[in-house]
Amino acid sequence: MSVTKAFHDAMKAGMVVAPGAYDCLTARSIERAGFSAVYMTGGGTAASMGYPDYGLLTMTEMADNAGRIAASVKLPVIADADTGYGNELNVIRTVREYERRGVAGLHIEDQGFPKKCGHLEDKTIVSIEDYVAKIRAAVSAKTDPNFMVIARTDSRASLGFDEAIRRANAAIDAGADMAFVEAPQTLDEVKAVPRLVKGPCMLNMVWRGKTPDMALSEVEGLGYKLTILPAVLSRSVLGACEIALAKLKQQGRHPMPTADITPQQAFQLAGADEWDRYRTQFR
């Protein structure tokens, strides 16, 4: 079964929860934990390369990371594609490159440059005409009908909730497979999105972000089809690193890792068992 069809089948069974991965190790952790999809976080990808989430990475850098993650797991990978990296022509190439790398879907937003994380301030929003044109271009570029084009709008912060809903519906009318209204700011807004948007909806849960924290069962009950938690691992890793390094500095010896695993177990988590079989298979 293709990963794109697997993703659609998972949504038929219930709301898909996709924790965020920024590399292959975090993606494999998500797979081992029993989730049905992986979300490649753009913010985490940028941070792993030494940059803030300000649109500083190129399309090929993002697509290459998405491809590495997709190759490391059997799960469908939904990936951040920022603004599509330009106009309609760039969007077409973006969809082709992500799809060619084995990604199950991507989202494209209506921010201008410099773009920012959706839960930060001072974002620039393009016109609805430019946004819808890029969504049409993205849909036209698909070769696999099951590849997900998710239309993200960041317009809530600067243009208001009603405009965000208008843009989400315009994107659905333009052929988007799912709408992503970024950063609704109240519980009433979170509840209203699936009711007002004329298509499947996605929610982004960011710890201490603009969207109220909710149990995933509540989110599913509202009618959302996909929830991403982009920073659930990257922030946990950052915190664990700070603690481990502080202990090393203070104690002057190797601190016990959060997961007390041996070197052999660590290599197993990176896929050593598969590669060990190849050592003798061809002799």
Image (cartoon, rainbow, N blue to C red):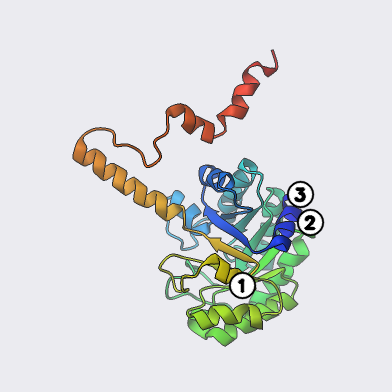
| 232 with respect to 248 (left or right) | right
Residue 117, visible in the rendered structure:
yes
Task: Between label 2 and label 3, give the one nearer the viewer.
Answer: 3
Residue labelled with disc 3: 2
Of mark 1 and mark 2, the one earlier in the sequence is: 2
Q: Dot 3 surroundings within 10 Å: few (below 14), some, or many (20 or more)? A: few
Residue labelled with disc 1: 221
Instruction: Kindly report the distance in space between the C-alpha atoms of the residues bearing marks 2 and 3.
Output: 10 Å
Mark 2–mark 3 CB contact (< 8 Å) = yes
Position of residue 259 relative to residue 147, above or below, is above
**SS at mark 2?**
loop
Instruction: Kindly report the distance in space between the C-alpha atoms of the residues bearing marks 1 and 3.
Output: 28 Å
Task: Between label 1 and label 2, give the one nearer the viewer.
Answer: 1
Residue 129, visible in the rendered structure:
no
Residue labelled with disc 2: 144
Report the amino acid beneath label 2.
Asp
